[in-house]
Image (cartoon, rainbow, N blue to C red):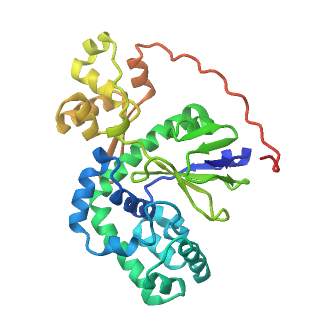
Amino acid sequence: MLRVHFTGLDLARLRLAGDPDVLWETVLSLHRLRDKQGESIYGDWRTETRTRLNSETRLLAPLVPPRGYFPDFLTPAEGVLGLETGVEALRATPADRIHDELGRLSTVRTLPAWIRSLAEGDARAFGKLITALHDYHEAAIAPYWAHIQARIEADRAIRGRALLDGGADALLSSLPPTMRWHAPVLECDYPVDRDLRLNGRGLLLVPSFFCRGNPVTLRNPDLTPVLVYPARHCAESAPPVQDAPRSLGKLVGQTRSAVLGSIGGGCTTSELARRVGVSAASASQHAGVLREAGLVLTLRHGSAVLHTLTPLGAALLRGGHRPQARRERPAFQERSPWAV
């Protein structure tokens, strides 16, 4: 189990990544390419990606084994700014850090010669790594980037709504079931037993399309704390369609009423079309009318489009009734810095 220890200052400095992190997605997708889980989500992606790959997986596989540790330098914080910026940050990693992290990897498996050369600071080996990452990204990530962005935006909408409704406490409580918030500790299912003490540095939460099951964090506790967690996938856990009051159907029409009830915690136009059983064009048109009426909010990020309910839209679905008051949570109490 991983236990992430918060102080009051850490809660104030809790952040949610604004975009998918291209290097985390690239590295974690190597896990999904080699396992057989999540076929309904990753099956078509695996089949299509394998037809475009050459030797990239063979080269990168020793750096990113199917289980356990992989070097922290592969996922610098700048990955959220795009591939080129992330690769430049990776390229700027100090040589002694690369040597140390690859040394940790070599204690559990025999590394090929080019990675041993990389650990010794060989520039040609580093160029080989960068080329392999670029080529793998072009085959496995770039063709699906709009879809990845849409899923991350949908997850961000859920977490953002929780944050607006109940602050950091509600945001941490909204995370997937493998992560459980018992203030002031976030307990996460994890392959090893570990404590991560934030000590006022805050935490960056990074939703990931290719993270599955357990969250992932950096091995080095001195680096800026990051917790990568699995974004919600509609194929696995689409929110149930909320039945709209009959009077709402009479007011706006049965299809438009169904559209409003199907948006739930947030969805893309294609997901909305599948839930309601209409074409994407029809779903977009109905969502547009509801948006003009102030019932739906549409967020655009590149080519991705995400629809969420406004407070008025949610109130209409409830038939004008207020939600039940939530039980008050105990106020956060900061632990002694020496508490376990």
Total numbered labels placed on residues in the image: 0
Residue 314 or residue 219, whichever sits in front: 219
Viewer can see residue 301: no
Residue at 53% x, 36% y is: 174
Residue at 18% x, 33% y is: 282
Residue 8 is situated, as x and y percent measured from the top left of the image, at 73, 44
Residue 115 is situated, as x and y percent measured from the top left of the image, at 46, 81
Residue 320 or residue 66, whichever sits in front: 66
Residue at 58% x, 77% y is: 103
Residue 313 is situated, as x and y percent measured from the top left of the image, at 39, 24
Residue 302 is situated, as x and y percent measured from the top left of the image, at 33, 54
Q: In screen coordinates, is 80 left or right of 217?
A: left
Residue 224 or residue 289, whichever sits in front: 224
On the image, which quarter does residue 233 sit in?
A: top left
Seen in the picture, residue 243 relative to 225 is either above or below; the reply is above
Residue 206 or residue 110, whichever sits in front: 110
Q: In screen coordinates, is 217 left or right of 255?
A: right
Viewer can see residue 189: yes
Seen in the picture, residue 71 relative to 165 is either above or below; the reply is below
